Image: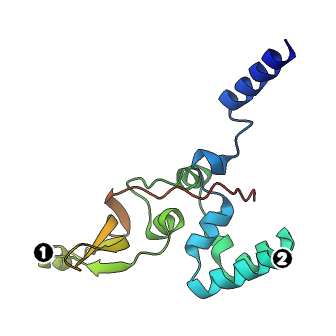
Amino acid sequence: MRKIWLLGLMTALLVAGCAVPAHWRGELTKRDIFLNLMTPEQAATFKTMEAEQKDEELLILYCQEIGVYQKWKALLPARQEVVRRGRPAEGLTPDELRMVWGAPGKIEDITDSAERSEGHKRELWSFDPKADRQGAVAFERQACFLDEKLLWFKGVRRQPSLWPRFW
């Protein structure tokens, strides 16, 4: 009887979302978001600080020092929620997409002459390069911006690791 009660309680918590950390549900933590905004050198410094078991306050101070914390805090709560889901949405800014997918492997200016003459700018961001059988590079994910707003995207985000970081 006790096992059934315990199983029922765990099921109720799971359904309510209380028992499963957001990270395990495929959502991004602040750590994921901050790392996505960092340069490789900044990320290496941050991970070294983590390995040395620096406390959370020092990690956040480092994020403030390099400016990634401010980019996150400047977002409206509704935008923070979109970013935390780990999936892009039309209308995101380049910084917001970087928070979701990290730095692109390649950025191309694909503005045509008509758009350029009207003062518009179109960029194609490509992520996760892979070599095909002939050795040509193909990208698993792409996103197109028009005037700093996400117009379209394709591909899916890799799932984060199962080891949660809770801040």
Q: Distance between the residues labelled 2 and 1?
A: 49 Å
Q: Which residue is denoted by mark 2 in the rendering?
A: 58
The first of marks 2 and 1 along the sequence is 2
> SS at mark 1?
helix
Q: Which residue is denoted by mark 1 in the rendering?
A: 114
Along the viewing direction, whichever of 158 and 79 lies nearer the viewer? 158
Residue found 23% across the figure and 80% down from its top: 135
- Please provide percent x and percent y for residue 152: 30, 58
Q: In this view, does 12 lie to the left or right of 113?
A: right
Along the viewing direction, whichever of 154 and 11 lies nearer the viewer? 11
User: At label 1, which amino acid type do we have?
Assistant: Ala
Query: Which-is-in-front pick, marks 2 and 1?
Result: 2
Q: Is residue 51 visible?
A: yes
State the colouring used for the structure image: rainbow
Q: In which quarter of the image is the C terminus?
A: bottom right
- Please provide percent x and percent y for residue 13: 74, 29
Residue found 57% across the figure and 49% down from its top: 26
Rate crowding at label 2 as few (under 14), some (14 to 19) or many (20 or more) other CA atoms within 10 Å.
some
Rate crowding at label 1 as few (under 14), some (14 to 19) or many (20 or more) other CA atoms within 10 Å.
few
